[in-house]
Image (cartoon, grey):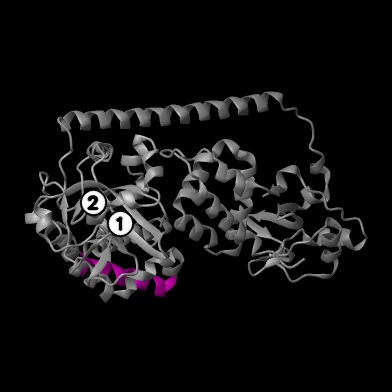
Amino acid sequence: MATESIIPVQLELTSGTYYTLWAPSWKENGEEWQAFLGSDDSLYFFTSPAELLAYINSGAPIDLAEHPKWRAFLHKDAESQAVPTPRHVYDLVAVPAMLAEKPSYASVDKVERNLAMARSLGRVCGIDRINGFFNSYSLLSNLSRGAEHFTGDDGNGEWSAIGQTILSNWGPVLDALDNEAVNDGGFDDNAGASGDAANLSSTSTSVPVGAPTGDTVSNAGATGTRTAPVFVTPAIPGNNPTDSINNAQRSIDDAIAAREDHEKEVAAERATQAENEEASSTPATDPYDSTIWASVGIDPITIVMNGRTLYTLRCYINDRPVFLGKFGQIYTFTSGRALSRWIVDHKDHDLATVSTWGELVDKANVGELKVETHPTNNYVFTNLAESIAKGPNAVDTDQLGQAYEVIADASDWAEDDAVNSVLLAVPELQEYISYMLGTSSNYLPSAPYDTEADGWRRLEETLSERFSKS
């Protein structure tokens, strides 16, 4: 989940579709918290992004104003403030159907995210039925382990067990959201912050992540027996709420149009650049094509990271990367000559099974193996995290693309989930990379970029931790 951020979310409940803001996790005074948009005893849900934005723009008092990122959130464009990205659309009604699918990366992630949202609503609202459900079925926590956990007969059996658990118990969870946490069985679209919600026991729209459920919790001056807050659609402050909502919708439309125009400009620039590069290219033979490396299909690569230049080898077999190494450890060397000497006496590594490996060994034995690296196989990480922190304009797209390529290749070869774990933990980084590499369809980066930079450093660590001591 994202940390220290505020996210617009869409919730599909039995009673309808609703929009609100969610702060999944932030730290305050050494304690980790989570919260939803609201004030005092009420959680605020809206029936459209425009209503949500109109309320945000009204300046009405809300608990989230105490969030450390609230001011930064207010500087985002209208789309980013009120329109959920596809990843933050939570269809709680469809959870049983999701579990009818096979346990792929997509299906496991989708179920895990929706259950996390239900768990957060139960915890923040103090809904005993929901909290009791999650406390009773610890099996559900295994969803956070990812799709790899549900492979093989045992994994498929556990996926089916989770499906049966949801099928048998999910109805009461939805009922709790639609009835226990909703005033008079429906959303109150007339209540304000001081309306019916004031009759509830004192509670709060934010709670510590590790707080006990169903007990007394204190936050922002509110202490008492936790009673489920009413989900309300508060009145939009001002003389003409309809005009405020219409103005908010125009702001959203303008922000979407600006983003789409920007994406078209970027695509056009890249297309023009590609055409120019193609037009200026010559059919001259690449000198690398005449080397032993091109002949055997195994390439030397260099990785510049943390002030060091390291050499290793990589090839692709059936489009799958294979590195010089074993059991997920990449054998690295501080010079091409050291790499060439090492090849002579070592056979216990994954590349030794490649049919052309013996040709390299023969060359190395007679001292004729010169390590030559093609420019496309030079991976430079220097100052990349710092550039990401400064913003997209400071990032060399080619450098980022190459660096991400070798990180992903290493993870694929090792057959672990190191990269996916980081991207799932820091979705802002995944969206940032997709945007920079031209694969994002509904994302426009906005400052600050500290979360993205920290996430990138974690990605770099997944690679550097694989290197042998050299």
**Residue 239 appears at what percent x and percent y?**
14, 31
Say which element carries label 1.
Answer: strand
Q: What main secondary structure does the magenta stretch of the protein show?
A: helix
Q: Which residues are magenta?
A: 152-170
- Tag 2: residue type? Gly
Q: Quick check: can you spot residue 154?
A: yes
Residue furthest front as drawn: 221
The residue drawn where x is 45% and y is 52% is 427
Categorize mark 2 by other alpha carbons within 10 Å: few (<14), some (14-19), many (20+): many
Between 261 and 211, the residue placed more toward the observer is: 211
Above or below: residue 433 compared with residue 345: above
According to the picture, the residue beneath numbered tag 2 turns out to be 38
Quarter of the image for the N terminus: give it.
bottom left
Q: Is residue 168 magenta?
A: yes
Q: Is residue 65 left or right of residue 43?
A: right
Q: Which mark is residue 35?
A: 1
State the CA–CA distance, disc 2 to disc 1. Answer: 9 Å
Above or below: residue 185 compared with residue 432: below
Quadrant in the picture for residue 398: top right
Say which element carries label 2.
Answer: strand
**Residue 68 appears at what percent x and percent y?**
39, 51
